[in-house]
Every structure is written in structure tokens, then in C-alpha cells.
Image (cartoon, grey):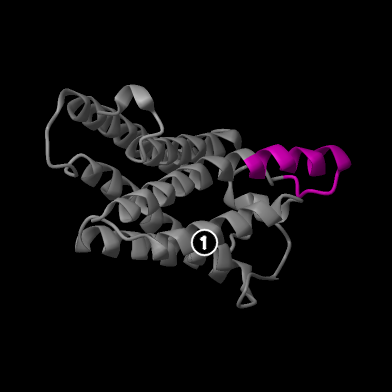
């Protein structure tokens, strides 16, 4: 890999990191405008996916599609990396194309004009695979690199912490509905997932100077 390829790779990693971090921030932040105006569905804040039914729908769809494009274009360190990012690309697009009903009264939703209950099933499948691919990618970050320097060991610890946070967030996410927690539980869990994943990409891109060799 020549110097130009390395620069391109780092830029792709930075963009992926920021896209994942900005998704919940922009969907929730701009969704508050719709909340104050009284135009959003009452359950719009229950999950990032539910912001599809808010005024911030633009960010939910566009950022997921942008992320899908960068995942697809990303050239990883080996074939497994490329397979994982391709899976992430397909699933990120699937999450946007098959929105969840979100407790609304809409019968036909999404790019393919499906019944909301059917679209929600596809949405959950794509989201589940997407988050699983995220965790696998983070764990694989720990294997990249030719030299096991002290900084590399520290980065590996941070990657592991991020992966553990993401796994815990998924477990909390899975328990929110069965245990009857308030609607904020899902979106908070998703924020931890997105932030942990996005932060890992920024570390990989060398944005955290303290962790760089």
C-alpha cells in the first residue's frame, strides 16, 4: 500500500467514524424542532429508526445511505474486512429502505411500499446483522498492524472496551421491550452502539493523537 492509498484509507475511516457518530446526534437534535412544532409522531424518539416518522427523516435516510456507500467503497486490510464492510453496506441500505412502523398508523411504508408490519421485520433483520458486523469489525481492529507497540496495545484495549460497551448496549436493547422500560431505553442503547463504533473508527483513522504511535 503506497502513501496515497494510506491517506485515502485514513480519510475513509474518518468519514465512516463521523457518519456513525452524527447519525443519532442529527436525527435526535433536529427531531426536537418537529417535537416543538408538534408535527412528529408521538413515538419518534423511541429509537433512531423511529425518527423516520419525524421531521429529521432526511438525516436518518441520507446518513444511512451515505454510510452504505462508504462501506461499499472501503478497501480494507484483507478479504474478510472487505466482506464485512460489504455486509454492513447492504444492511445499512436495508435499514433505510425498510423502515420500521414505529407504532404509527401508516399501512404502507418504505422504498418498496410494503405493509408496515412486513417492513418492520426486514428492518429488524438488517439492523441486527448490521450491529453484529459492527462488533466483529471492532474486534478485528485489534489484529491489524504489523508491530505490537505500547500504543497499539493501548488501542487494542480501547477497541475491546468499545466492543464490550456495544455488546452491553445490544443486551440492554433486547431487554427494553420485554421488561417494559420507558421508550428512551432503546434510543439510549443505540446511541452507545453508534458512539462506540464511530469512536473506534476515529481511533483507527489516527484522529486521537494520544493513541497514535
Left or right of 110 in this view: 204: left
Range of the magenta residues? 26-42
Please tell me which residue is depicted at 49% across the width and 56% down the height of the picture: 67
Q: Relative to the observer, which residue lies in front, 26 or 168? A: 26
Query: What is the tally of numbered marks visible in this picture?
Result: 1
Q: Is residue 197 above or below residue 74?
A: above
> Is 66 placed above or below 48 here?
below
Neighbour class for label 1 at 10 Å: few (<14), some, many (≥20)?
Answer: many
Residue under numbered circle 1: 95
Q: Main secondary structure of the magenta part?
A: helix
Residue occupying the point 42% across, 52% down: 12
Q: Nearer the viewer, residue 145 or 4?
A: 4
Q: Residue at x 40, y 38 (%)?
A: 202
Q: Is residue 103 visible?
A: no
Quadrant housing residue 83: bottom left
Reply yes or no: does residue 192 show up in magenta. no
State left or right for residue 187 relative to residue 76. Answer: right
Amino acid at each position: 500500500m503506497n502513501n496515497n492509498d494510506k491517506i485515502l484509507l485514513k480519510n475513509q475511516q474518518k468519514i465512516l467514524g463521523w457518519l456513525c457518530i452524527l447519525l443519532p446526534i442529527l436525527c435526535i437534535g433536529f427531531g426536537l424542532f418537529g417535537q416543538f412544532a408538534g408535527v412528529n409522531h408521538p413515538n419518534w424518539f423511541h429509537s433512531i429508526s423511529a425518527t423516520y416518522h419525524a421531521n429529521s427523516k432526511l438525516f436518518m435516510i441520507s446518513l444511512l445511505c451515505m454510510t452504505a456507500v462508504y462501506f461499499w467503497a472501503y478497501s480494507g486490510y484483507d478479504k474478510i474486512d472487505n466482506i464485512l464492510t460489504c455486509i454492513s453496506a447492504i444492511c445499512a441500505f436495508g435499514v433505510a429502505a425498510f423502515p420500521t412502523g414505529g407504532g404509527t398508523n401508516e399501512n404502507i411504508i418504505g422504498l418498496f411500499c410494503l405493509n408496515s408490519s412486513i417492513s418492520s421485520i426486514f428492518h429488524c433483520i438488517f439492523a441486527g446483522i448490521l450491529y453484529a458486523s459492527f462488533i466483529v469489525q471492532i474486534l478485528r481492529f485489534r489484529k491489524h498492524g504489523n508491530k505490537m507497540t505500547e500504543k497499539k496495545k493501548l488501542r487494542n484495549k480501547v477497541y475491546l472496551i468499545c466492543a464490550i460497551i456495544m455488546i452491553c448496549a445490544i443486551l440492554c436493547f433486547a431487554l427494553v421491550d420485554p421488561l417494559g422500560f420507558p421508550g428512551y431505553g432503546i434510543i439510549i442503547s443505540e446511541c452507545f452502539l453508534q458512539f462506540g463504533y464511530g469512536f473506534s473508527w476515529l481511533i483507527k483513522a489516527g484522529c486521537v493523537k494520544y493513541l497514535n504511535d
